[in-house]
Structures are given as C-alpha cells and as structure tokens.
Amino acid sequence: MTVEIRTTGVKPIRNAFTHLEKRFGDKNATRYQESAYDIQPLVNFHYKPLWEPDRDLYDVRRTAVVMKDWYALKDPRQYYYGAYTITRSKQQDALDRQLDFVEKRDLLRSLPLAARQQLVTALIALRHYEFGANMNNSHMAAYGFGTIFTQAAMMNCMDRLGMAQHLSRIGLLTDGNTGESLTEGKRQWMDEAAWQGVRRETERLFVTRDWFELHVAQNLVADGLVYPLFYQQFDAAFAAQNGSALSSLTDYLMRWYDETNRWVEAIVKTAATESAENATLISGWTTKWRDAWVAALQPIASQILGDKGTSALDAVTTAFNTRAGKLGLKL
Amino acid sequence: MAADGNMKPAKKLSLKENYAMLTRGLDWEPTYQKKEDIFRMIDFEGIKIHDWDKWEDPFRLTMDAYWKYQGEKERKLYAIIDAFQQGNGQFNVTDARYLQALKIFLTGIVELEYASHRGFCMLGREFPGAGPRIAAQMQSIDELRHCTTQIHAISHYSKYFEGMANFPEQFDRVWYLSIPKSFFEDACTSGPFEFIVAISFAFEYVLTNLAFMPWMSGAAFNGDMSTVSFGFSAQSDEARHMTLGIEVIKFLLEQDPANVALVQKWIDKWFWRGYRLLALLATMMDYVLPKRVMSWGEAWTIYYEENGGALFADLARYGIKPPKYADVTIKEKGRVSHEMWSVFYANRDAVNFSTWLPSEEEMAWFSEKYPDTFDKYYRPRFEHWRQLEKEGKPFTCKCLPQLCQVCQWPCLYTEPDDATEFLHRETEYKGETFHFCSDGCKDIFADEPEKYVHAWLPVNQIYQGNCFLPGVDPTAPDFNPLVEALKYMGLKPGVDGGLLKDSIDAQRWEQWTSRPANIHEGAYTDFVRKTTNG
Ligand SMILES: [Fe+2]
Ligand SMILES: [Fe+2]
Ligand SMILES: [Zn+2]
C-alpha cells in the first residue's frame, strides 16, 4: 500500500504518553522512560492475596521505607529489556573470547594442583552465593513497589544466574569439564567451617521480607564486601603467585559489579536523601548487615589469604564504609 | 582433580551436558533456616510434591545463550520499529477503524503482560526447586519484554491518535478494562500452583494460539507492521512458555494422585475465565478489524474444539476431563461477538474507542459465517439501530449494566439453549445478592466466595460514589456520578468513545491520508470526497 500524506507537515498531536508528559513535559520520551514509569497498577485492586490477605497485590507497606514517589528510584543505566539484553550479549561476546583463550591454552588446568585447589576453595563455592542473590533479587522484583525498581531487580536477578554460571565455567576450565571442581566447591560450601558464616548469612537473607532491606543487605552490603574481597584482594594475591590467567575471567565479574553498583547506589542514595527517617532506617540496616557479613567473611578471608586475610578484609570494609558515607548513610 | 603432568584433553560437552554442568548442584539445601520459612507459599493450596527434581527447567537455556538470542531478536525488532516510525507507518494501516483495535490492545493487553511478569517473578522466588524457579524467572523477564516492546511498538500511534495516551491509568479505572485486570489479579492473588495452572496451562497452552494467530494475522492483514513485528518476535518466547505449561501439568499430575482433583478444578475455572476474557478478542476479530482473518466461530472451532479436543484426549490417561462448560462455549460461538459488540455500541460513550454499525456487506459476511444465528437474532437489531442512526437519534444505553461478579462482563449473555433469553444467575452470600453472567462464573464464585466478594466492580463503585476525582463533592446538588465517573476513567466526551464517524480520529485520518476512516462506510468528510471526486 502506498501512503499519500497530503501535507508534508502532519504534526503529532502529542509527543509523549500522558503519564510521561506529567513528569517530563510534552516532549519525546526515551524508550527507558516508556518502559519504566507508572506501568505497575496503583489502585482498584480486586482481591486479597491468598498468600498475604492483609496486603494488596502491589503494596507500599512491604517495606518500611517511605517514598513520596516510588518512581524516583531510577536506574542510571536506563536499562529497558532491549538495552539490557543487547548490552549483556555484547559483553558476553567479549567474555567468550577470554574463555576461549584460557581454554585453548589450558591456562587454568595447567596451574599447579595447590593453586587449582586454592581457586576452587575461594571461587567455586561462590556459585551458591550468586544463586542465593538470584533468589533474593527475584524477591525484590516480585514484591517491590514500582516498575522502575522492580524491572531493574528482575535484570539483576537474571544477572546473578549468569554469574553463577560464569563461576561454574571457571570451575570447568579448572577441572577439564569433569565437574569435579563443582562437586568439591559444593562440598566445601556445605561442610567446611570457613564457609559457614557466609552460608548462614545468605540463608538469613532468604527470610528477610522487607524488599528494600533485602536490596541493602544483598546488593549493597554483601556484594560490597564479597566482590572486592574475592575478585580483587584474592585475585591479586593469586595472580602474584600464578600469573593473570584467572584475572582475565574475574575481570568480567568486577566490571559487572562496577556497572551494577551505579544502580545499587542510586537506589540507596535517592531513598536515603528523601527523608531523615529513611536515612536512619537504611543506615541501621547497613550497619547491622555490614557487621554480620564482616564477621561471616573473616574465616574464609583467612583461609584463602592466610595472614593477609584480616588486613584485606579490613581494607575492603574501610572502602565500603567510605562508599556508604558518600550515599548519605551514617554507620 | 588430576595431579600435575598427566593432562588428557578436556572433555567436550554437548549443549545439554553444558547446561547440566553449569547448573549442577546449584540449588540451596538450607540448614540454618527452615525450608518452610524460606518457601512459605507452597503448602497452603494442598498440592503434594514428593520430588522437585522431577521438574526440570524445560527451557535449558544458560544466561549467555539467553542474552545473545534475545539480544539479537531485540536488535531486529527495534530496527523495524525505528523504520516504521521514520516512515510514518501509522498511516499504512487500513483505516482509522483499525486503530480502535490498537486502543483496546494497548489499554487492555499490555498490562496483562506486565501482570504476568510479576506473577511469574513470584514463582521464581517461591518454588523450592531450582529448575522450576529458573524457568519461572525466564518467563517472567520474557513477559517484561512483551510489555516493554508492546509499549514501544504502539507508542508512535499514540502520538497521532487519541485513546492510547493514558493507558496505565485507564487500565486501573475504565469499567470494561476490569475484565482483563480482574482476570490476572485473580491469578496473581492465588497460590503459586493455581497461578501456573491458570496462566501457563489454561491460558498459554490451551488458549494462546487462539489469541495469537488471529490477532497477529489481523495486524498483518491490516498493514500494521509494528504490531506484527513484536508479535512474531514474541512467538519463540511463547513457544517456550507453552512447553512450560504442558510440562507443569504433567509434573503435577504425576507427583500425586491427590493432585488430580485440584488441577481439574483449576482447569475448569481458568478455562472458563480465559474464555470469557477472550470474548474481547472475539469482538475485535468480528467487528473491529476492517479486514478480517477468520471469524471467531471458525477460530474457536479450529483452535479450541479441534486442537483442544486432542489435548484433553491425551490428558485423559491422568484422569483429566475436558473443562466443565466447554459445551457452552460451543453453543455460544455463534453469538458472543454479536452480543458483546451490541454492549459496546450501546455504551459507546463510556469506552476509550469508537464504535459503528456493521455495513450491509459486513452483515452479508456475518450471515455467511454465522448462518444459524446472525440473520435470526442480530441482523434485525443492527438494521433497527441503523435506521435510528439515520433518523439522527442513535440508540444508546441510558443506564449502567449489571456486571458479573466474577468475569466482570455486563450480564448480557444469553441462555446457552435460547439465544432470545438473557441469562442471569444470582446467589445469596452473607445476606447480599451477587450476580453472574453464566453458570461457569456462578460456580467459580461458589467455590471461593470470600475471594470474589472483594472484586472491584466498576458499576457498583460508581453507584457507591467511589469513582470521582479528588476535589469533587458528591453531596453537591448538581453532582452527576456518571459524568464524574467518565472523568475518573480518563475519558473525554467528544474525544474518546462515541460513533467513529463523529470522532476526531476519523476526521484527522481523512484529512491526513485522504482515505476513508472506515473502509466499509466510505468517506465521512470532504477531505476524502474532494480527493475522490477531483
Ligand atoms: Fe507474553
Ligand atoms: Fe507468555
Ligand atoms: Zn461472568
């Protein structure tokens, strides 16, 4: 069919959806804005959830944090589904080249046995940590309030599954695809004393229902200690002994962590600067979970870093405290 | 792990082995917290699961594969949407009448994708097995994709036409949109097993083809490249979702014989609820699309009676019977769209799309497609209404209809065995009377009255004075609940609803394209007459 537009100047009658016009004025909206703002239903809910009869299906009361506008919690990365998957697929392409490089040259398999054992102890158990983070972010995406937050939590949830699988790959590169390292990593995760603090605290996250607290505990505090401790401190110590083969694969985790932190911090900072009550609440959560996680990480830090374990964890904690301070938190 | 020095080449892994390895033993076996405190929702419905490992993730997609596969689809899709927008593709559709279908779609369906995303996300948190949790999460983010891409595909239309700009607000408020809204909220407020039977099996597996095929072909037939593109791009997601639907039902049935009765009850309920939701689609297919693909009656015959028949024959070995009241859907198939279009026409001032009466030629098509019903019951009505339009006093409904407490359609369906008799059922519960459009809906209420008494029925809410904007004084002498309710629903008289020929969309369409706003009626304005004559 040919289109014959009689005037060259057919002008749009509006430039944006009404809800976006109210927020940003009558100008073209970005794809991120169209995907993220005001999509979750707000009123006129029909039934009481059988699983929580004293709340609505979407309900602000599922966290103690109070926001005048929940859509203030924007994602600085401006991820909507398309932007998110396209970015991740590009990053994965780059990672695949790294994985390929390591695999072809057997860089991890040819490490001395002791180094491989150390690698398994330090990193492979973290698959389960990631899978726990996957479930926790699923909780935030399911029970959080406002599409702008929940859709980013959904992406983070899938990211964590991806990270668990990436760590599994590191294991397979170490054991030559036999899966022995995965079995051993799980055994240590379940049975070794050094890992039990981390496992216990992760399980405590599973029964933490306040989704904003969970965001603080998992995405800000736990990740804020775990990632630098393992993928920087341990990674550097390991590279000093064994060369940089492993670093070429943990680099992906750190890049992901840096990128994700932009979102994690924006959420915390926006909510904490909204009111003194929020700031107090979030500071309290941060302190409580930081103390618990620092204690939980102490034994495994000592196990993988020897007598440098304590100073490494101290350095990570100090950096974390500084970061939290910049977000407006008082610890 | 092998000691140094004697390294064999690394074992090559097949795709399936690779998936198995990457997720091997990943799941949690909690010891510090009680399992029932972590997974709190899986016991209250009464479903018995003995071995969660028997439910494997049917998608078996690792995240790297998912990102790449989906990222590639998104690249292609947005390339088409960009081209569509740059080329003013919105004027390539058949006519302004087609746009009315898009209004129903954007305001009524997009939010269902969103609800589905949130619902599956809850399952992705609550199922105690790793396989089902991952499968639910993948479906959840897929549904987020559908919501997002649909908004992006239709957003450009909203810049040129009315009725789409405030879709989230309208979904929450417009009376007939409580039909889709209540459907998904019903599912999301149920337990996880009922949700997955309702959405994955009854809706996606049994009924989705019916929604998908006619709707996407309808968009293609009518030149809507934007909608067609996201539809076909979503098709491979849907294929995965349907797999989940059939696998979950078999898993539940195989786990414990006691599950059969519960699953059957949910199939009965959600088949009926889904069927009533699809009456919206029936109406779009038969009445709104200017170029039709097939009739609703034909679609129901192929996609439910034939395909569904085979499916339920297959499930018989588990003790599952075809859904209750499936026979009623077959009796109704020659009537649903005509009856519901009559409802919309009569209430056209209170909806967000415009209506019209079928032309002579369209009525001839109906006579052919619906030989047993159209001429007998509906043609005389439409001819009478056409006469009234000619006389300048088009028929409208002056009062608000009684809504069904369960499906929320107006109670204006007819008796399964008598198309001349309006069907009406009611029931007393705790001293109050509740009304239903059908035996199917009445049964659903009877099984869970405590749930359905909380339904937010727009008409009742309007009468109770709950549907007006802040600042309106309901005690003022000139307070008119209906006028205020329209404002509350975000409907502007003279812009939304009404007759297509009087609508601002039709006028602009003809002005901009020099083509008729309704190909079945010829020119409404001089913009087309001039071009046609000159
Ligand atoms: Fe979908
Ligand atoms: Fe789907
Ligand atoms: Zn009903």
Image (cartoon, coloured by chain):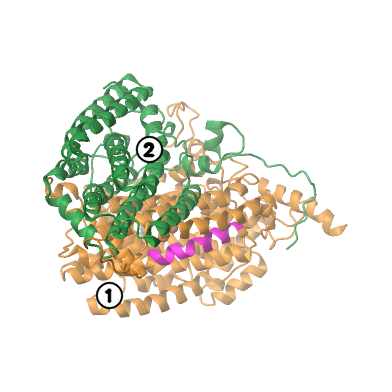
Q: Which residue in the rendered view is the most extreme toward the front?
A: B5
User: Who's the residue at 53% across and 53% down the image?
Assistant: B104
Q: Is residue B227 magenta?
A: yes
Q: Nearer the viewer, residue B395 or B511?
A: B511
| Residue B133 appears in the figure | yes
x, y percentage for residue A170?
Answer: 32, 55
- Can you see residue B405? no
Residue beneath disc 2: B464
- Ligand 2, what quadrant? bottom left
Q: Residues within 10 Å of mark 2 (few under 14, many from 20)?
A: few
Other-residue count near label 1 (Cα within 10 Å), few / some / many at <14 / 14–19 / ≥20: some
Q: Is B350 placed above or below B203 here?
A: above
Q: Is residue B152 magenta?
A: no
Name which residue type carries label 1: Lys
Question: Would you name the residue on which mark 1 appears?
Answer: B321
Determine the chain carrying the residue at label 1: B
Q: Secondary structure at mark 1?
A: loop
Which region shows up in magenta?
B226-241
Query: In x, y percent, where is residue A11?
Result: 72, 42
Tell me which secondary structure the magenta stretch mostly adopts.
helix
